[in-house]
Amino acid sequence: MDYLVNLSTLPQDKKSPDAMAKAGVTIRRALPPELKLIIRWIDEHFGEAWAGEATVAMTRQPPTCFIATREGKLVGFSCHEATAPDFFGPTGVDESLRGLGIGRALLFASLNDLKTMGYGYAIIGDVGPSAFYEKAVNAIPIPDSTPGIYAGMLKS
C-alpha cells in the first residue's frame, strides 16, 4: 500500500540532528562520483531492484539520493523521484545501526527536498514499516493503492 505525507504540515525533525551528532553520523546529498560505490552497497544490502531505483536517483541533477555516513563509510541511503515523480523511496540503513535514528534523518532529508522542489504532498510507495511513517511524519494510507506503480514488475 502507498502512503501520503502532507509536506506543508511536516513536523520539524528535532530528534535527528542531535541523535546523528551523538552517533557520529553525517547525512548529506550523494555526489555523482560516488554512484558506483553507493549502488554496489545498496545492491549488496537491499537487492538489485532498490539499486536500480537508486541509480535513477543518483543520475538526476542534483541527485535525489541522500546518504548517511559514519567514519567515512556508507551506512544508509534514501531516494526520491526515482521510480515516479513525488515518490519517496527506496530507503535503507545498515542492519547493525538500526534504531539510532538514521532512517528518520534520511526520511526528513528526502521529504524536505521534495518540499523545496515545490511539492505539497509526497507519496511513499509500497510502504513496509507503516507504523514508522505514521509516527514520524503523520503519513496516511492511500485507499486502493495496491498494487500501485510496481504492479507487473519483473522479478529475478
Image: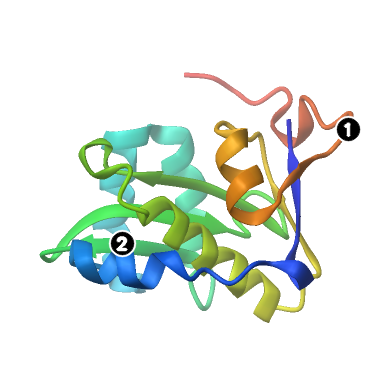
**Percent x, y of residue 46:** 36, 34
Say which amino acid is labelled 2.
Ala
Q: Residue tagged by mark 2? A: 68
- Residue at x 27%, y 42% (from the top left corner): 94
Q: Quadrant of residue 133?
A: top right
Instruction: Tell me which numbered mark, 2 or 1, is placed earlier along the sequence.
Output: 2
Residue 29 visible at all: no
The Cα–Cα distance between marks 2 and 1, rounded to whole angstroms, is 32 Å
The residue sitting at the left extreme is 71
Q: Is residue 8 above or below residue 95?
A: below
Q: Residue tagged by mark 1? A: 143
Label disc, if present, on residue 119 of the rendered structure: none
How packed is label 2: few (under 14 Cα within 10 Å), some, or many (20 or more)?
many
The residue sitting at the top extreme is 156
- Residue at x 31%, y 42% (from the top left corner): 98
- Residue at x 46%, y 47% (from the top left corner): 91
Is 125 in front, or is 3?
3
Say which amino acid is labelled 1.
Pro
Q: Secondary structure at mark 2?
A: strand
Is 87 in front, or is 96?
96
Q: Is residue 26 left or right of residue 80?
A: left
**Percent x, y of residue 17:** 37, 72
**Percent x, y of residue 123:** 73, 51
Q: Is residue 145 above or below residue 91?
A: above
Q: Quick one: quadrant of the N terminus?
A: top right
Q: Quadrant of residue 127?
A: top right
**Percent x, y of residue 11:** 64, 67
Q: Secondary structure at mark 1?
A: loop
Residue 88 visible at all: yes
Q: Is residue 68 left or right of residue 121?
A: left
